Image: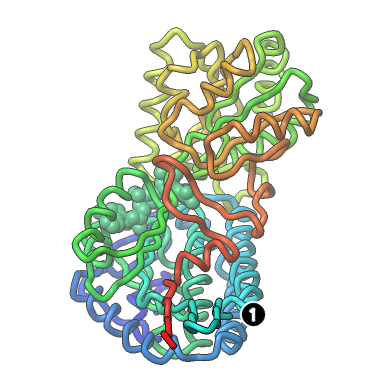
Amino acid sequence: MTTMNDLLTVGHLIDNELTDSDRYDDVVDPGRLSDVAARVAVGTPDDVDRAVKAAHRAYLSWRNVDPAERARLMLAAADALAGSGSDLAAQLVREHGGMLWEAQTDFGLGTGVMQHTASLVDGFFDPVQFDDDESFISVERVPRGVVGAVVPWNMPVVLTMMKLAPALATGNTIVIKPSPFAPAALTVALYRMAQTLPAGVINVVHGNADVGQALTSHPLVRKIGFTGGTATAGRVMAAAAGTIKNLTLELGGNDPAIVLDDVDIDAALDRMLKGVFTRSGQICFAVKRIYIPRALYGTFADAFCERVNQYSVGHGLDESASFGPMNNKTQYDSVNALIEETKNSSAKIVQLGRKLDSASDGYYILPHVVRDVEHSAPVSSCEQFGPVIPLIAYDDENQVVEWANDSEYGLGSSVWTTDPDRGLAIARRIEAGSTFINTHAFESLDLRMPFGGVKQSGIGREFGEAGMREYVDEHSIRLLK
Ligand code: NAD
C-alpha cells in the first residue's frame, strides 16, 4: 500500500505483505468522475494461486489454534477494523458513492459481526457424543480449509466480515476478492486486521471476473462465500462444480413491502423510506415494491411523494445530501433504461427531489416514484437496484400474499400494520429469508437472525451460529466395542 500524491494505491495482500502488481486500474469516484479515488492492482490467476497456497499453508496451523485463542485474536482484528472506520470511511465514500454515514455504518456493522461471531465460539466445537455397550460415537465439527470470498461494492466491509468472521472463528483461512468498484479502503482495513493474526490467515487478491473464476475454481479452495448478483452466482456455481465446493450465496432480491389497511401511514413512512432510498436503493434487501390496499392508495401515494420530494441528491461527502450516486456506469445506464421503459408504459412515473451543486459530475439519479402501476410491470418484477420505486394497489390479503411470492427472488420482505397478530400471520405466509414487521432497513437486522435468501436469492445463511455452521463439516467417528 502506498500513497503517491495522496493517491491511495493498493496491491494484493498475501502472507501479510502488500505485493506489487504489473497492472493497476483507476478507481473513479462515481460522485465526481474527474476524481480518481484510488489505484488498485489488477490480478491474474497466478496471483490467485499464490494467495490460495499462502492461505493453505496458514490453514495447516490456524485450524489447530484453540478456538478461544482464535476468538481472542478475532477481537483484536475487530478493534483494528473499528479504528479504520474513522480514517477510511471518507475514502470508501469516494469509491462506492454512498453517504459518509452509510460508509461509517458499514464499518460499524462489520465490527459488530466480528465481535458477535467471536462471542459464539465458546461451546461451538463441543462434540456430540454417545457412549453405550456397543459403541462410542463422537460427532465433531471441523473447518473446511481455504475459503474463497467474493464480495460486491455496495456495503463491502460488512459483506466481507460476514464471510471472514465465521471463517476465522471456525479455523479456516481466507482469500478475499473485493469488487473493483470499492477495493481500496477495504484492503487497507483488511491489511490492518491481518497484522493482528498469523501470516496467511487473511489474503486479498484484486481483479475482475477472471480472477473471481480462478478463485472459485481453485482446487485448494474448499468453500465459497459469495455476495453479488444472481447471474454472477450461476457462473460461480459452475466454476465451483469442477471440484465440488461448498457454497454460501447471498444474492439479489425484489423485496415486497405489504401495507395493511390498519397502517399508521406517517409512522410507517418514517421507517419505510429509509428502506427504499438508503444507498440510493443499491442494497440487496432494500424495499423494491410496495403493495397498498386500494382504498388507501391515493392517500398513501400522496404522502409518500410529498416526503420523497424533500430529498436532495449529492456527493456522499456533502452533508446536506440525502443520498448519493449510482456506483458505476452499468448500474446508472440500467436504472435510466428502466425509467425510460416505465415512461413509455401505462404507469405514471414522477421524478422528485432536487440535485445539489455537488451532483454535477457523477452517476446521479433523482428519486422516481411509479404510481398506478401493475404488479406484472417490469419495474415491479425486476431488481431495480436504484432510486425507483413502484407503488402497487391490491384488493385483498390473499392477492397481495400471492403477488409478494410471485417472484424468483426471496430475500427480505415486510408487513406494515398496527396489529402485531395480523402482521405475524401474513409474515408466515411469505416466501423469503427474512420478513420484518414495521421495519425494513439496516436497523431491521439483528445478528441473532440468520440472514439469506430462498429461491434465486441465495443458498445458506450468514450471521451467528447458523453462519458459522456453513464453514464447518461434521466429522463422525464411531468406535465399535
Ligand atoms: P456482481 O455479481 O457483478 O459482482 C459481485 C462480485 O463478483 C464482484 O467482486 C465481481 O468482481 C465478482 N465477479 C464478477 N464476475 C465473476 C465471475 N464470473 N466469477 C467470480 N466472481 C465474479 O454484483 P455487484 O454489481 O457487485 O453487486 C450488486 C448485486 O449484488 C445485486 O444483485 C445485489 O442484490 C447483490 N447483493 C446481494 C447481497 C446479499 O446479501 N444478498 C448484498 C449486496 C448485494
Residue named by callout 1 = 122
Residue 457 located left or right of residue 393:
left
Residue at the image point whose x is 39% and y is 20% from the top: 340
Q: Quadrant of residue 240?
A: bottom left
Q: Which of the pair 312/360 is nearer the observer?
A: 312
Q: Measuring from the top left, give residue 352's x and y in whole percent.
A: 59, 24
- Amino acid at pointer 1: Asp
303 or 248, which lies in front?
Answer: 248
| Image quadrant in which the N terminus is located | bottom left
Depth check, front residue: 307 or 223:
223
Outermost residue, front side = 133
- Looking at the rendering, in which quadrant would you find the C terminus? bottom left
The percent coordinates of residue 368 (x first, y second) are 53, 25
Residue at 37% over, 71% down: 147
Tell me the colour scheme of the image.
rainbow
Q: How many marks?
A: 1
Residue 415, position as x, y percentages in the image:
67, 31
Regarding residue 33, the answer to whether it shows in the image is: no
Q: Residue at x 71, y 35 (%)?
A: 424
Vertical comparison of 297 with 475: above or below:
above
**Residue 397, can we see it?**
yes
Label 1: element kind = loop
In this rendering, position of residue 19 left or right of residue 75 = left
Horizontal placement of 326 versus 321: left or right?
Answer: left
100 left or right of 36 in image: right
The residue at 51%/42% (across/down) is 411
